[in-house]
Image: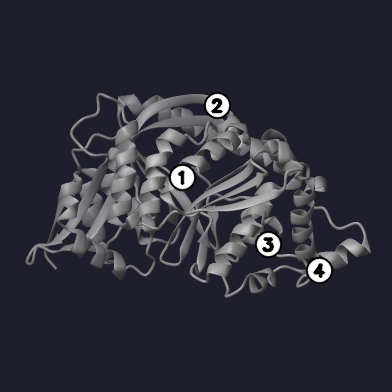
Amino acid sequence: MPYQTRILCRKAELADLADDWERCRRRRAQRHLSHRLEHIAIEAEEMARTRSPAWTGDEGMMVAALFDRDHGTLVGAAPFLIQDWTWRCRLGYASVGAFAVRRALLCGTDWIAPDAPAQQEALLRAVLSAEVPYHMISIEGVPVDSDLLRLVRSSPWVRREFWVDTLAAVTPRRLVDLPGSFDAYLAKFSGRTRRTLKYKAKRLKGAMTHGMQFQRITRKEEVQSFLDQAELISARSWQGRCLGQSVNGEATRRKLEAFAERGWLRCYLLLDGDAPVAFVIGKLDEGTYYYELPGYDPAWASYHPGSVLLLMLLEDLCADGVPRTLDFGYGENEYKRLYGTRSYDEVTVRLVRKSAAMVVPYVTHAACWSGSALIRKGLDRFALREKVRRLLRGEPAPGVQVETPSAAGDEAEVAPGKAESFARAAAP
């Protein structure tokens, strides 16, 4: 099929292609919310609000579009968000350097295109040769068996113009296939694990002197109050303290309100009376729940509020009967292994433009990653990695984390089918 490519950087250009775009998106076996045009526009607006004053001429996005030359119809696209980003180089949790770079971040983990190699290659060449100024292309969570990863690794155009950074370890992407009921989901655990999980919920509820409150946030008018609470938790959490990943209510509010207006928003909050204890920011679309940003107050760490809130969330999703899958997103964690039902391997790829400005950031990042890998190897040798991780995050030791009922009466009380559900136990 003869085709041509164009680079589009304005919402008005994409709006004219809305019908063709949606047809291309729906042809994909795995649809992703990040590929919706409305979602791309909302994220681009957020990027535009946080960009440097010197950045002009575009609207926070870059889309390589592939057209059928004979009919002029869109047949594929590679959508990217363009943002001013801080590339933090860490040795473990210690920051060694932070570099301001402009990156092109792929929306989703793949682009919207047929599996034909010629068309995939045409899109890649269009992205690499785009005149939009950026220092780095970032593809987060690309499946290791994907055609896109094979193309990036084998392309001579990539090797000529970019350093290919695939230093990040291959990690499993964990998902939860949600059955028709929460009881059916709990059946995946052993009887002892089910009792332990329900005991955690009971223990946390008992420790809350003002009463456990469980809230689901889906409406625009609920967003501001939710973010006020999430900010308090985020500032205290290990992500906020160690990684600088605090929730910024003002910067996030407009985006979450836009998600709420389109019916995508699905956040959760766990409180002791009016005091926030844990939260989750997420989205729901076409049967998939995107579990994006959790956090909990470390003062409650020994009571496992994050784990309890996740179980309440899963029960709430099962009760709706709408979501079929929970996607934990990129990155590996112990709780994802416990609650997930299936996984596939993925990796983050960064294509760093070969230029004088990027030599120091790239070399610093590579040195930090190699040093961190050696530290992890040493800690693993003495079985200390998990203990050190918990210490740095302020989490309870493994001996504290898994508590079992101490008396037969407690075990009977929390046995499957006899205890209160997590959501009912949390009702005010």
Q: What amino acid type should be assigned to the residue bearing mark 2?
A: Ser
Q: Nearer the viewer, residue 360 or 425?
A: 425
Lower position in the chain sequence, tag 1 or tag 2: 2
Q: What amino acid type should be assigned to the residue bearing mark 4?
A: Ala
Residue 223: give its label.
1
Q: Splitting the image into 4 quarters, where does residue 395 fall?
A: top right
User: Mark 1 against mark 4, which lies toward the viewer?
Assistant: 1
Q: Nearer the viewer, residue 409 or 148?
A: 409
| Residue denoted by label 2 | 95
Q: CA distance from mark 1 to mark 4?
A: 37 Å
| Residue denoted by label 4 | 415
Q: CA distance from mark 1 to mark 2?
A: 32 Å
User: Mark 1 against mark 2, which lies toward the viewer?
Assistant: 1
Lower position in the chain sequence, tag 2 or tag 4: 2
User: What SS does tag 1 mark?
Assistant: helix
| Residue denoted by label 3 | 424
Neighbour tally class for label 3: few under 14, some 14-19, many 20 plus, Cα within 10 Å:
few
